Image (cartoon, grey):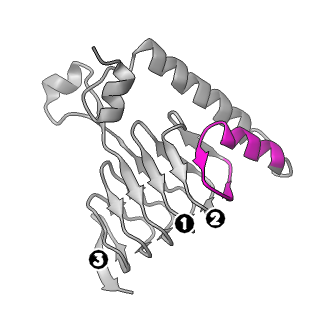
Amino acid sequence: MRSEKEKMLAGDFYNAGDEELCKERAHARDLTFEFNHTRPSERQKRQELLKQLIVAKGSFYIEAPFNCDYGYNIEVGENFYANFGCTILDVNKVRIGDNVLLAPNVQIYTATHPIDPAERLAGKEYAKPITIGNNVWIGGGSIICPGVEIGDNAVIGAGSVVTKDIPDNVVAAGNPCRVIRNI
């Protein structure tokens, strides 16, 4: 029988109230609380705390405040930057490429719930992975929804709600986000 964590990572319905998952979320919240309450001058301490949370393939910088569910499902490439107020609900994998810039208040949500109210009321949850390519810039206040893939070199305009995949080399914006032009 699979654990609730295995179900969660497979994108199947799982119980978020599972003891193991609750402990892991509490650990991530403790680390993000500590990170969010460091002084800006404590750069080394901030990096050490974040390295306990996320998988970084190179240099990266995240401004406080930052929040996530687990942390271990977040993988960032070389030269990643997230501005103030980034929230990543990493119930499933979030893969972010090299040279990615997130403006203030970008929200990345892998977590979702059933459309059917009876299933939702029964406490069922699931999640879909998100992939953000290389050389991507996501404008302030944008929301990236579960299951979305954003292609290389894309620019997402401020305030966008990205509900569907965005191809390589485009500028996209709006609610819902749509391609405006090629780069």
Circle nearer the N terminus (1, 2):
2
In this view of the protein, can residue 39 be seen by the observer? no
Circle nearer the N terminus (2, 3):
2
The label shown at residue 79 is 2
**Label 2 SS:** loop
**Label 1 SS:** loop
- Residue located beneath label 1 in the image: 100
Instruction: Point out the stretch of residues depicted in magenta.
Output: 44-64
Residue 13 horizontal side relative to residue 35, left or right: left
Identify which residue is drawn at 53% across, 23% down. Answer: 24
Q: Is residue 45 magenta?
A: yes
Q: Nearer the viewer, mark 2 or mark 3?
A: 2
Q: Residues within 10 Å of mark 2 (few under 14, many from 20)?
A: some
Q: Nearer the viewer, mark 1 or mark 3?
A: 1
Q: x and y percent of residue 119 in the render? A: 17, 24
Residue 77 horizontal side relative to residue 156, left or right: right
**Label 3 SS:** strand
Q: Are dots 1 and 2 in contact, CB under 8 Å?
A: yes
Q: Residues within 10 Å of mark 3 (few under 14, many from 20)?
A: some
- Residue located beneath label 3 in the image: 179
- 16 w.r.t. 37: above or below: above
Displayed quadrant of residue 182: bottom left
Q: Residues within 10 Å of mark 1 (few under 14, many from 20)?
A: many
Q: x and y percent of residue 73 in the render? A: 48, 40
Residue 101 horizontal side relative to residue 160, left or right: right
Identify which residue is drawn at 60% across, 54% down. Answer: 57
- 43 w.r.t. 182: above or below: above
6 and 176: which one is in front? 6
